[in-house]
Image (spheres, grey):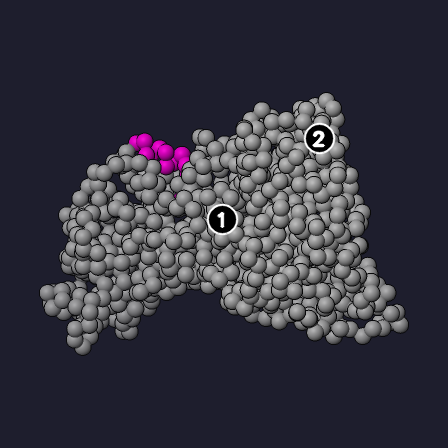
Amino acid sequence: MAGFSNFSLDPYEGVWTTREASHLLRRTMYSPSKDDIADAAAEGLDNIVSRLLQGNLLPDLPVNFYYDGDPFTPIGESWVNKPMPRADNTNQIRRARVRSISAWTMGLALEEGVSIREKMTLFWHNHFVTGDERDPNFIHKNITLYRQNFLGNFRELTKQTTIDPSMLRYLNGNQNTRFKPNENYARELLELFTIGKGPTVGEGDYTNYTEHDVAEIAKVLTGWRDKGYLYREGGELPGSFFTSWRHDTTTKKLSRRFGEIEIPNMGEQEYSHLIDIIFEQEEVSRFIARKIYRWFVYYDIDDVIEKNVIYPMSEILRENDYEMYPMVEALLKSQHFYDSYAIGSLIKNPLDFLVGTIKQLEIDLGTDMRRKYQLWLRIGNLSELLQMSYFTPPNVAGWKAYYQEPLYYRTWINSTTLSLRFQLTNLLINGVEAEDIRIGADVLGMIEKIEGADDPIVLIDQLAALVLPEEITDDQKSYLKSILLPGLPDYEWTVEYNEYLANPNNRELKTAVENRLRGMIAGMMSLPEYQLS
Amino acid sequence: MMKRRSFLRSGSILSLPLALNGVKVGVFSQTIFEEIIDPNNDRVFVLIQQNGGNDGLNTIIPIDQYDNLANARSDILIPENRIIKLTEQTGLHPVMTGVKELYDQGMLNIIQSVGYPNQNRSHFRSTDIWNTGSAAQEVLATGWIGRYLDSIHSGFPEDYPNSDFPHPVAITLGPTVSETCQGIAANFSLAINDPTSLSMIPGTEGQELPDNPYGRELTFLRQILSQTNEYAEILSGVAEMGTNLSPLYPEQGVNRLADQLRTVAQLISGGLQTRIYIVNINGFDTHANQTSASNSTVGIHANLLTDLSQAVHAFMDDLQRQGLDQRVIAATRSEFGRKIVSNGSFGTDHGNAAPLLVFGSCVNPGMYGENPTIGSNVDPSEGVEMKVDFRNVFGSILIDWLGASETTVQSIFSNVFTKLPIVTACSTTPTTELPVETAVSVRAFPNPFLDNLTVQFKTPGGPAQINLIDASGQRVAVLADENYAPGEYTIEYKVPDIPPGTYYYQFVNGDFSKTQSLLHF
């Protein structure tokens, strides 16, 4: 691996073409459109990166989309911050709201716009994992924290997460008292959320922290509880509060890994002080830099990458007081990010695959609110079938693809999930009845914007550039052309496509052209290359 | 020679008591029960697709129309003295010496003026029609071979491959499956490039992937992909057992049709039980330089016909040498013929009907139908008039060669079918003479299913129940539960709001029961 010259976080100064622009957009969005890529290529690296990273307004709240038995939320209105009634149908109401937020989350992915926000929101969800939450208001509050601060201050996010009501429940912080300390959150705070576990170098000593630190930090965090869980009318909104009588008021002393610092009783402010102490360790910045790298670039971090990319990233993070924006910006503008080493190497996770495929195929889900939510909900269900379920990561470490050696991204793919992906692609291309409408690829719409689409070579080149991360071989292109034009010379595509364009209402002509296109696009999306981003 | 030991296939047909409620079940067999597979019928049908629209008038040349042809297409017409005469009236393009040999041996049936009514001159649309066997104004989603295979493999693709059908039902030589083989629940054909390396992904032969993360992850994905082909091992084993004996095959890589047919012969020789093969020869869309400007006997079309003639000749010779020739027939097809009048670029434009060739030791040798009539003053837009509907040709092959019943063929071709004497030389075993079997079968599709699930079943009568069961064994729904009269039934089930994942449907009818997994998206 030594010998690669562009393993550097220095600003990229090479050519800026659609190849680089689409790489940037593919990694920071679920799936860019042809227009998005063209715009990005035209406006240049600096402009498109600031557009991608800029803050944007929070989306409209999720709404009740089908259940007419929720006394506080008529269909079409949002249930967020509405209480749960005391009624026989509490469970149905809760279920309808959970479905609403699940569906809505898929909708936000599909309607992401040119923004890194949704990918970063999922990054944080995968970083500060919570799961199995039963209260939709808790889920909404938790995910909104990350969506609102998607490139915010890592230290601040850690502080807010520490007392986030979902997290207090998920890792038992709400049961952590001076009488019965619960170490669950303290351990993950160190191991998974901030500094990471280093090599075990002694009894209970993980280089970056020790077992003693876990016990002491648990004491620091005693006294916090969540409130407003499944709250009733007139009750309190979801939140957290500090109960001083449950708090351990003794002075805690951390190990030599933290300079044996003492933490006196600071009551309600103590957790915040603790996190400031943890964040003084430089390893925290490297830990999150590696995680960002694995999210946006590639999983393999060897000594060269560690030294030339991760260290400089972490320095930027520290220089900017743990603000994420400058570090992510530097990465997305770096030489390394645009090196062929970084292009096309990321295996799409199920959401990348599903949301991306639906966007690529320009599948129209209609405008009806209820039906859209229902279809979004099904996309979430399908993602679960492909082994990724939003709001339910497999465990507190998140999805294996982003931490589990040696497979990493490859954990998404086995012969079952790969077959499922192919079946889904084919189904979506050919169209299927769902929620009383036929949904399917708009293959003619997909090629409408391609200039010179009546030339099969241009058509295949342009489509491949849009859906595949790297140039495919001439043999692969002729294979695709042989599907589009079985045994025919190129100009017959020109003739037939133009004839369709001249007679767009001729059903037989349209079907015949669509059939050819569907086959070719299915062939393209069945290339294993399509699983890469 | 392969002989199936039994009519019965596990999983989809079970023997049932012959009498139910005092009525002999057998009387229903011709109309309501699926085709019984003749255990002795190990016959193979090879479809040769001449893609692009073959110029029939320069292939099978109507010598008796020569003067009028000379008016219409003097620049590309074969000189009369170069035509290979089959009869005084009809001859072959001079390069088709192999085909002449087969004609002389009684192994060729030429069917004149084949097409379909209301010819559509769009390649795409016309190919759709030849694939589906639809009428000109009809749009069908399944292929005609697919519908035939649906009639005998009513459980496909569930449980395939299985011990009775361990081999692919149909094979397409090339990178993509044939739309002709599209069935209601799945495509019956397996696309193979090279049976000895099925893991080969189209267009990647000899490709060296870069030594970088992209190359590494792609290598991994390709490995996983190659593991998804469940026929890979069987096919490479069969291919290894098979052989080719004809010296007439051109060198590998020279004639792509010959290469494909050589593979087909090798697979048949190795004992593959697949009965349908689709092969392709491309490039018949000869708008320009169909013939050379200086010599009408050479050019693109001459090269294509050389390939066709050599390939079929070698293939038939190979089969004869291996004693397999009575098991195989092959037929050509092209989406249309070309215009009678040539176009000024030493080529021809899209036309109508054209001759169709059927090869094999068992075909009715000779010619079916008259030469087309060429007028003395042909309109430039005119094509050869259609006399024989292609559906009659293929339907006759299905009946007389593959053993389909006429009822089935009528339903495949919307009841417009008329039988022709195409296969007559070898004794056939019509289905009507088979012992009557009772049958019960069931299948559900599509798989994966979304909002709609169709269950089709055939019953000899009696109480039948269909349940939908989830992965934990909980019954989700009862799709059917009543006492049925003997017959075929279709249940259209509107799927309620259930999570995606694996489900099972369970069909119970008398002693017969079947449970099969389905995927819900």
Please state, as top left, top right, bottom left or bottom right, where the N terminus of chain B lies in the image: bottom right
Residues drawn in magenta:
A31-43
Q: Is residue B329 left or right of residue B424?
A: left
Q: Secondary structure at mark 1?
A: loop
Q: Residue furthest bottom?
A: A203
Q: Residues within 10 Å of mark 1 (few under 14, many from 20)?
A: few
Parent chain of label 2? B
Q: In the image, residue B355 lies at what x, y percent? A: 70, 41
| B80 left or right, relative to B458 | left
Estimate the spatial distance between the alpha carbons at disc 1 and disc 2, rounded to whole Å: 33 Å
Q: Is residue A390 magenta?
A: no
Q: Position of residue A365 (x, y in %)?
A: 53, 42
Q: Chain of mark 1?
A: B
Q: Can you tell which quarter of the image residue A54 is in?
A: top left
Count of labels in the image: 2
Q: Main secondary structure of the magenta part?
A: helix
Q: Residue at x 48, y 36 (%)?
A: A456
Residue topped by disc 2: B66
Q: Is residue A108 above or below residue B299?
A: below
**Residue under circle 1?**
B254
Q: Amino acid at mark 2?
A: Tyr
Residue at far right of view = B22
In the figure, is residue A452 to the left or right of B238? left
Which residue is drawn at the image coordinates 46% and 30% (left, top)?
A: A452
Query: Tag 2: Cα neighbours inside 10 Å, few (<14), some, or many (≥20)?
Result: some
| Label 2 secondary element | helix
